[in-house]
Amino acid sequence: MTDQPVLVERDGHVLHIGINRPDKRNAWDLAVIRGVSAAYARLDVDDDVRVGVVYGAGDHFSAGLDLAEVGPHVREHGPGALGGAGVDPYGLWTDPVSKPVVLAVQGIAFTLSIELALASDVVVAASDVRFRQLEVGRGILPFGGATIRAAEQWGWGNAMRWLLTGDEFGAREALRIGLVQEVVDPGSQHDRATAIAETIARQAPLGVLGTLANARVARARGEAAARDHLQGLLPDILDSEDAAEGVASFLERRDATFTGR
C-alpha cells in the first residue's frame, strides 16, 4: 500500500479507484477530492476503460469530509469545490462520468459516502456498513446531492427519515430503500463489485454507454425526452461493428468480442 491518498489502477477494462487514508477513516481532504476527480476524468475519456470500481482502503469506506481543511475551501469557493477540477464524482457540478461506476462500501460510510452511492450506478455493501447523513446535527445540510437525489431514489418518507434525523442505519435498511443493490460479507465487497464491473465490461461498450445515457435522460427530463434521445441514439448503434458481432456470436453460439466500434 502506498501513501498516495487515491489509488488508481487499471485491470483490463476496469479502473479501480481507491480512497487511501485508512488512518483517517478515509476522510476526504483536498488531495482526495482532486485525486478522485482526476480519476473520474480518466474513466470518462480512456477508451481502454469501460467501467469504474470505487472502494475505500482498510476497515471503513469514509467518515466524510475532512472539514478542518475542506470546510474553509468550500466556504470560499462554494459547494462545487467538492467536485474537484476534473469530472465531479457526484455529477452535480460537471456532467456525470459517462461510464458506469460500481461502488463498494464497508464500515463507516458517512455523509459524502451516501452521496457518492446516490451518484453511482451499482452499490455493493458489506454487512457491517454504517450509513449516516449527519450534517443536520452539525449545523449544516448535505451539499453533495443527498437533498437532490435521495427522495427520488428512496421515496420521500424514507429520505426524510434519514436526512432530517441524522440517525445511523445499516445494510438491511440500505437494501430496503434501494441505496445498495447487494449485501456481502465484510472484506468481500471489493471483489464482488469487481465481479459486477467485469461483467459490465464484457458487454458491448456502445450498448452500455447508450443504456446509461438514455436512462439518465429519462430520470432527469422524463419519458418524452428519453424517447427523442433514443431515436437519435439507436441508428448508429444498430450500424456498429459491435452490433454485427453480437448477431454473429449468437448465430455461431460463441461469446462475443466487443471493441466499442
Image (cartoon, helix red, strand yellow):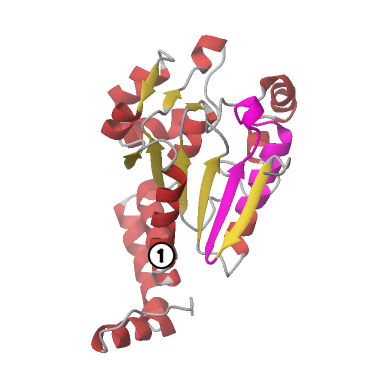
The answer to whether residue 94 of the structure is visible from this angle is no
Q: Amino acid at mark 1?
A: Val
* Residue 20 is a magenta residue: yes
Quarter of the image where one finds residue 163: top left
Q: Is residue 204 left or right of residue 110?
A: left
The residue located at (50%, 13%) in the rendering is 136
The residue located at (51%, 26%) in the rendering is 111
Q: Position of residue 79 (x, y in %)?
A: 63, 30
The residue located at (46%, 42%) in the rendering is 104
Q: Position of residue 129 (x, y in %)?
A: 42, 29
Q: Position of residue 30 (x, y in %)?
A: 72, 34
Specify start and end residues of the magenta stretch as a single range.
Answer: 12-40
Instruction: Count residues near mark 1 (Cα–Cα under 10 Å), then give few for <14, some for 14-19, many for 20+.
Output: some
Residue that carries the numbered disc 1 in the rendered image = 208
Q: Position of residue 212 (x, y in %)?
A: 41, 58
Identify whether 224 is placed above or below 111.
below
Identify whether 87 is placed above or below 77.
below
Quarter of the image where one finds residue 152: top left
